[in-house]
Image (tube, coloured by chain):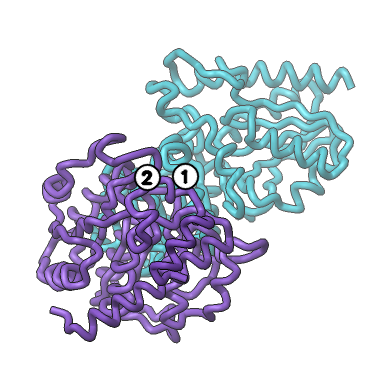
Chain colours: A cyan, B purple
Amino acid sequence: MKQAFIDSLKKLMEKDNKVIVITADMGFTVFEKIQKKYPKRFFNTGITEQASISFAAGLALSGYKVYFYAQAPFISMRCLEQVRLDITYNHLDVKLIGSNSGFSLNQYGVSHFGLEDIAIMMTLPKMTIFNPADSMEMTKSMEESYKIKGPVYIRMTKTGNQTIHKKNIIINDPILMDKGNDGLLLVSGGLLDRAIQIIAFLKEESINLTLYSCPLIKPINNNLISTISKFSNIFTLEEHTVIGGVGSTIANLIIDNNIKAKLTKFALPDDYLHVAGTIDYLLDESGLSVEGVVGKIKKSIRKL
Amino acid sequence: MLTDKEIIHLTKLSKEIRKQILKMIVKANASHIAPSFSIVELLVYLYEKVLRIDPKKPDDPDRDKFILSKGWAVSGLYSILAHKGFFDKKLLNSYCENGSKMIGMTTINKIPGIEASTGSIGHGLPIAAGMAMALKLNKINQRVYVIIGDGECDEGSIWETALIASHHKLNNLIAIIDYNKWQSFGRTNEVLNLEPLKSKWQAFNWQVIEINGHNFNEIESAINKSYLSKNKPIMIIAHTIKGKGLSIIEDDNDYHYKTPRIQELIVAKREGLI
C-alpha cells in the first residue's frame, strides 16, 4: 500500500505541475525520491500540522492541488479546525493522506492509533473518504482523488500493506469478493484479508456469505444501498471505533432506506487499549479475531 | 512622504469608511465596531496606495492579495471593497441580514475581493504564507498582505507560521499586527503577555518595523521599507487604538461586543460620523 501510494503520487507529480506535496515532517523513507526530483513542489513544513493545513489552503486558493501527508491521528484531530474551516468550508482541492491509521503503530499506544479518523472526517461536508484495503485500492483511490476537485481523505493502514485484488476494480463501487446467500459481510480497509479468512472458515461450516470490500465510505454509493437491501443478515468489519465508522454508516443506511435487516458490527470497542502488542494481537484483543468473528456470525445466522 | 493633498484624501476616506462601518453595525445590531475602527487607516492606505488589484479583474492571477486574518473586522473590509468598486455598495446594507452572504466574519462566499475565509484566529497568517509561496513558485512578483490581531498571537499556529515563512524566505509576505492591546477578555499584556513582541518576531527571522497604525506617513514608510527585505518576511507592528475615530468608544474593550446605541450615536453625530 505504501509503495502504491508513493508510485501514484510520483505519477501525479509527473503528470501535473500543479500537484504539490506537503508533509508535516512525516514520511521517512517515503518521500526522499520525490523530494529529490521535485524540490520545489515538495515541502516539509516541520511539525506544524495546524499552520501546514492553512498553508496548504493558501496554495490551493492559488490554484495548486495539494497532497498533505501526516499520521492519521494528527491530521484528523490536531488540526481538525483548520481542515474544517480552511479546507472543507472553502471546498478546496486538498487531499489529506492519513498514514498509519488504525493499529499501524502497534507499539506506540493510543497517542499514535488512528481509531476515530473516519468518524471525524465523516462529519465534514463534501469530504470524500477512501479507506483502501490493499495496494490496488490505494492506487485507485489516488487516481480518483486526483479527478475530484475538492477535499479527499485517504486512510492508510499497515494492515493494508497487501495485494489482494488481481483484477481491475472500480474504486467508487463496493467490490464483490465472494458470493453466498446466507448473509452479507461488508469490510472496509485492511481487514479485507481477515474477512476472506472468515468467509473461508464459515464455508467449512456450510455458511456462505457474500463479501464486499468497500473502499469508498463517503459519499454513499447507490450500489451500496442496493447491495445491502438484498440481504436480511448484514455484518460489517473495520479497524476503527464502532462509533461513526463503516458499521455506523451502514446502520444509518438501513434505517434511512427502510431496509429490513439485522446488522452486526465488528469494529474496535468504544474504549482505549492500554497494552502493547502486534497488530494482530491488538485486533484480536479488540474482539476482531477470525475465530471470534466466525463464532459470532455462526450464532447470528443459526438464530435466524 | 505623502503630500498634504494625499493625506487629506486618505483622512477623508477613512472617515467615510468609519461612517459606513457604523451604519452597517448599528443596522445589523452587530458586534466588533472597535476592532474594525482600529484598522481603518491601514485598510485605506493599503487599498488606495499599495495593493495592485483591479476590481474589474478580481481573479487576476497577477494581483496582490490581502487577507484579513482578524476576520471579525470585516465590516471595514466590505466597506473599502465596495468603495473600490468590487461590488455594489447596496450590498453593504445586507450585512448580517437574513439570507445575506455578507456574514459578520470574513467569508469568501464568492464576494469579489475576499481572498480567504477567516474568523477563527490564527488561520489567516498561514493561509497568506501559502499564497506567498504560490506566488514564488509561479514566479509572480506580487505580494501578500495580511492583518492579524494582537490576541491572535496567542495561537500556536501563528508561531508555526513564523517559522515556516522565515524558513522559506517569504519576503513577499507582509504581515501587520493591529496592536490595539486588547483581546477578548482584557489587556493583551494582562491576559497573556506578548512583550517583547518586536524581538520575538526578530528572533523568528522576520524583518520587523514598528509604527503608529493611524499615521499615514508612518504606514507609507513601513511599506517602503518592506521592499528592502531580501529574504525575510515582514512584520509591521502597528500600534493602534481600539475604536479609533469615535471618542466615546476609543480604547474601550466593551465595544468589541457592544453595538453603539443612543448615547454613542449622539457623540458619533457630533463627531461627523453620521
In this picture, residue A178 sits left or right of residue B124:
right
Q: Are marks 1 and 2 in contact (CB under 8 Å)?
A: yes
Q: Residue at x 73, y 34 (%)?
A: A185
> Which one is in front, A235 or B37?
B37
* Real-space Cα separation, disc 1 to disc 2, in angstroms: 8 Å
When the figure is inspected, residue B20 is found, relative to residue A123, above or below; the finding is below
Q: Secondary structure at mark 2?
A: helix
In this picture, residue B265 sits left or right of residue A297:
left
Image quadrant in which you'd find residue A197: top right
Inspect the image, locate mark 2, and give the three-letter code of the amino acid beneath it.
Gln
Inspect the image, locate mark 1, and give the three-letter code of the amino acid beneath it.
Glu
Q: Earlier in the sequence, mark 1 or mark 2?
A: 2
Q: Residue at x 74, y 18 (%)?
A: A296
Q: Residue at x 29, y 66 (%)?
A: B145
| Residue, disc 1 | A81
Residue A103 place in picture, x, y as percent: 48, 27
Q: Is residue A29 visible?
A: no
Q: Residue at x 14, y 71 (%)?
A: B221
In this picture, residue B238 sits left or right of residue A27:
left
Q: Disc 1 sits on a residue from what chain?
A: A
Quarter of the picture containing the C terminus of chain A is: top right
| Residue, disc 2 | A50
When the figure is inspected, residue A292 is found, relative to residue B103, above or below; the finding is above
Q: Secondary structure at mark 1?
A: helix
